[in-house]
Amino acid sequence: MTKRLLAAALVAGFLAACVASLLQFALTSPLILAAEKYETAALEAPSRAFANPLIVLAHAGHGHGGEAEWQPAPGLPRLAFTALATLVSGVGYALLLGAVLVATGREVTSSEALRFGIGGFLAASLAPAIGLPPELPGMAAAALESRQLWWLATALATAIGLYLVAIRRGAVAVALGLALIVAPHAWGAPHGPEEISAMPPVYAAQFSARSLAVAFAFWAVLGLAFGWAWEAVAGREGAAARPGAAV
């Protein structure tokens, strides 16, 4: 069971990361680059602590105490770093998806894993985006710690709520699930001070919509690929266990 889970998670995470990386390159990366031009124009040029061309300091003043934050240099380093982060996230989310499928006693098929993948999109992407939509560089935002805490609470509450509504389905379970889904939004997401930005508002709207579209594709591929890989590994294990099978 553990080997099957790991194998399916690796396959699903890799395939989902490939799809998401291509979509990010085509849909969201151009908007990020355009937004960074406006951000750079509004800030003083950051100082360089090292001569290493693979690391640049950017977003000065966004960290605590006004220290500069580093990010990969534009071009291939940034693409590689983003793809690697997406791959790691994909495998991690696939492991979580598989663990939830097994823990709930559901039969692991492509269709069932797809449904759970859509649930993952609702919990980890869509629900948090209602209060904290994806943000471009240079946009005003609350402290990172408070945003991360609210995102985590919203994702957990939504995931548990979806489980109660879609799987348990009792009257009390549905009522409690709906309450959990609504609770983080009733509490309210943390927001930073309002600032006037030279960046066209359409950039922010496009980035938010495209980011959610990429996230949906990521979770859909993750679910489908996990179910397919699980069934494929199970089939090979069954064939190997038959009498007379080659060792």
Image (cartoon, rainbow, N blue to C red):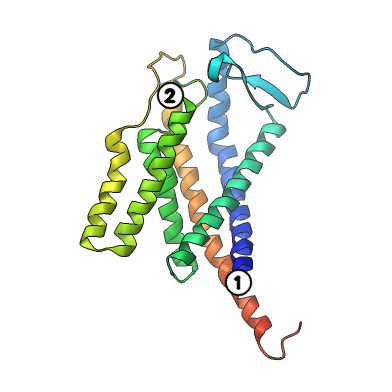
Say which mark, if any, is on residue 20: none
Q: Position of residue 113 (x, y in %)?
A: 47, 63
**Disc 2 marks which residue?**
142
Residue drawn at point x = 48 percent, y = 45 percent: 215
Left or right: where does residue 167 sit relative to residue 170? right
Asked if 134 appears above or below 137 in the picture, the reply is below
Nearer to me, 211 or 88: 88
Label 2 – label 1 distance at C-alpha: 45 Å
Q: Residues within 10 Å of mark 1 (few under 14, many from 20)?
A: some
Nearer to me, 175 or 119: 175
Left or right: where does residue 77 sit relative to residue 184? right
Q: Amino acid at mark 2?
A: Ala
Residue drawn at point x = 31 percent, y = 32 percent: 188
Label 2 or label 1, whichever lies nearer to me, is 2
Dot 2 or dot 1, earlier in sequence: 2
Q: Position of residue 3 (x, y in %)?
A: 64, 67
Nearer to me, 223 or 69: 69
Q: Amino acid at mark 1?
A: Ala
* SS state under label 2: loop
**Disc 1 marks which residue?**
232
Residue occupying the far left of the picture: 171
